[in-house]
Image (cartoon, rainbow, N blue to C red):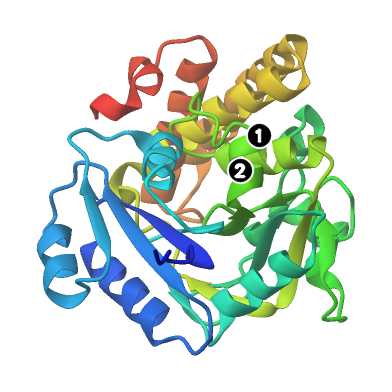
Amino acid sequence: MTTTAAPDVSIVIVNWNSREFLAKCLASVFSAPGGIALEALVIDNASYDGSDALVRERFPAVRFIQGRENLGFARANNLAAGQATGRNLLFLNPDTEVVGAAIERMVRFIDAHADAGAVGCKLLNTDGSLQTSCVQAYPTVANQVLDSALLHRMFPRSSLWGTRALLDAAAAPAVVEGLSGACILVCTAAFLEVGRFTEDYFMYAEDMDLCFKLQVSGRRNYYLGDVSVVHHGGQSSDASSQSQFGNVLMRESIAKFLRLRRSAPQATAYRIAMALTALSRLSVLGLARVLGFGLVRPAAIDGGLRKWRSVLRWTVGAEAWVRNPGAR
């Protein structure tokens, strides 16, 4: 009687209206050099964008799972991971492209480090520049309230941001807090042990939550700065409504993280802080709209007003679609 060894890694990709990016992603996966055995699973979140035909015709070895509803990132990943057979799981966004032997190097690393919870790598923008979101600190009220481009530039090594590993010239693996879910590798046994992705999240913060649970379990999360993946970024969401849906849902997810992993009072404090921030931003933008004298584009001001109105409405529970985003 013969048995087939489990793949070294199962690659799980959640697709939503990303057919063209998915094609490039899968092509990069299967053209990458390396001596590891892999399987790939694509789960489509009810976008029905022709990805099923694409996969069937161009990537017949890929297992395609057609969802009948938009399950969100966490639930879809969990569903596909439940059908995977690899001893490791690589959760990969459809709008990514693997650079060189990135997958093999990440798998070799996690196999060689028993203490590894999750492994991430350097994410690059389309133009090759660094995507700083590939490493983050766990959300707190402080780092969310103080989050601004100016403070990041003034204090780049602050523990508030958790991005110090990105600034170190050394190529040695670094222990970090959170890793981006755009490309995150976990041992299957560890993933199951900590309860998989927490399905309270529809989108955003589920990657921080998973890293947090892995760390609490006694493991370490590693960033490999000499391994790269291109993340075109934002293409799996509807850019036309990003200022409303995306920005509000991100805050909803952060509030959930604070409630689940910190405390209910911290989640409440965060919501209050966001209400005050929204009010102040609306005041400044409203004043700029009246007194801008052409220095600021009216379209940019109007976009900001729509965004912060939605955030303010969320803080008082008025954004109903955030409570049931899968219905959008």
Q: Quadrant of the C terminus?
A: top left
Instruction: Describe residue 39's horizontal placement relative to residue 70 as left or right.
Output: right
Residue at the spot x=36%, y=72% of the render? 25
Measured from the top left, where is residue 314 in percent x and y? 48, 18
Residue at the spot x=78%, y=48% of the render? 177
Secondary structure under the numbered disc 1 in the rendered image: loop
Vertical arrangement, residue 21 with respect to residue 170, above or below = above
Vertical arrangement, residue 82 with respect to residue 25, above or below = above
Residue 191: mark: 2
Disc 1 to disc 2: CB gap under 8 Å: yes
Q: Nearer the viewer, residue 264 or 311?
A: 264
Measured from the top left, where is residue 20 in percent x and y? 23, 69
Q: In the rendered image, which residue does mark 1 sit on?
A: 194
Q: Nearer the viewer, residue 143 or 303?
A: 143
Q: CA distance from mark 1 to mark 2?
A: 6 Å
Measured from the top left, where is residue 266 in percent x and y? 76, 17
Quarter assignment of residue 67: top left
Residue 76: mark: none
Q: Nearer the viewer, residue 260 or 131?
A: 260
Residue at the spot x=80%, y=64% of the render? 113
**10 Å neighbourhood of mark 1: few (<14), some, or many (≥20)?**
some
Quarter assignment of residue 82: top left
Q: Amino acid at mark 2?
A: Phe
**10 Å neighbourhood of mark 2: few (<14), some, or many (≥20)?**
many
Measured from the top left, where is residue 215 in percent x and y? 79, 41
